[in-house]
Image: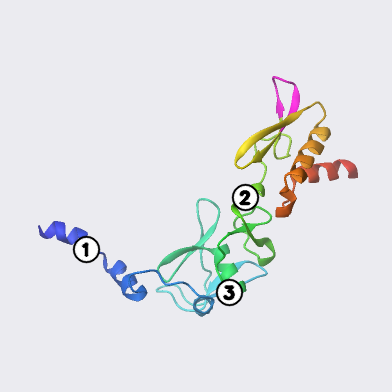
Amino acid sequence: MNGQVESQMPSRSVQNVKARTGTKREKLTQERLKELLHYNPDTGAFTWRVRRRRIPAGSPAGCISGTGYVTMRVDGYQYLAHRLAWLYMEGYLPENTVDHENCVYGDNRWINLREATNQCQMRNRGVFTCNTSTIKGVWWSERKKRWRVQIGIAHMPHHVGYYIDILDAAYHRYAAEQCLGFLDCDTNSSAKKFIDSQMEG
């Protein structure tokens, strides 16, 4: 009986968190964040202003997770560093996501962060490494012996067409992005980059 009761008791660390938060999570404020951490907008790095157990003040804060994002624990809760950067600079945690413009998840420089909807974040994803065209939504079809163009609408892939010339495929992909308002997200269109590179060459 004692073992069963004890297994239901919260750990000491959980009890401490509950005592500090009043049984529910306190909202992290910009003021509290700046008490604990310093954020360098030029490098995107966080450092501790206060000593944390064996970690002295001035030490780098955060670690890179398996997904490539920098995370850190603040007042007993885990946070994504790019969202903390937004709170540090703007004074609030956005309801939308905070997107990395260059698609490098560990690059938390302020110039690289922007508030974006989930839809815009999806549109800003990079090209898959297996895509030999280097253009998002454009790949070679062995069956058709042509470049196939596809674009996502509401998380569903939609066929645009098949094209013999890759530049023609890039133009049609970019036209579809313009038609569907992809550029409203200020995304770095790989199709536009490819077209520009061909024009320069």
Q: Which residues are magenta?
A: 140-149
Residue 98 position in % (x across, y down) = 60, 60
The three-letter code of the residue at mark 1 reads Met
For label 1, the residue is: 9
Where is residue 75? Give x, y as percent: 42, 71
Q: Secondary structure at mark 3?
A: loop
State the image quarter where residue 16 is shown: bottom left
Mark-to-mark CA distance, 2 and 1: 42 Å
Quick check: 75 above or below 166? below
Q: Tell me which residue sits at (69%, 19%) in the image.
A: 143
Residue of label 3: 91
Q: CA distance from mark 1 to mark 3?
A: 37 Å
Q: Is residue 201 visible?
A: no
Query: Counting residues from the N terminus, which is met first, the one under dot 2 or under dot 3?
Result: 3
Residue 114 on the magenta span: no
- Say which element carries label 2: helix
Closest to the observer, 59 or 194: 194
- Crowding near the residue tagged with mark 3, few <14, some 14–19, many ≥20 C-alpha atoms within 10 Å: some
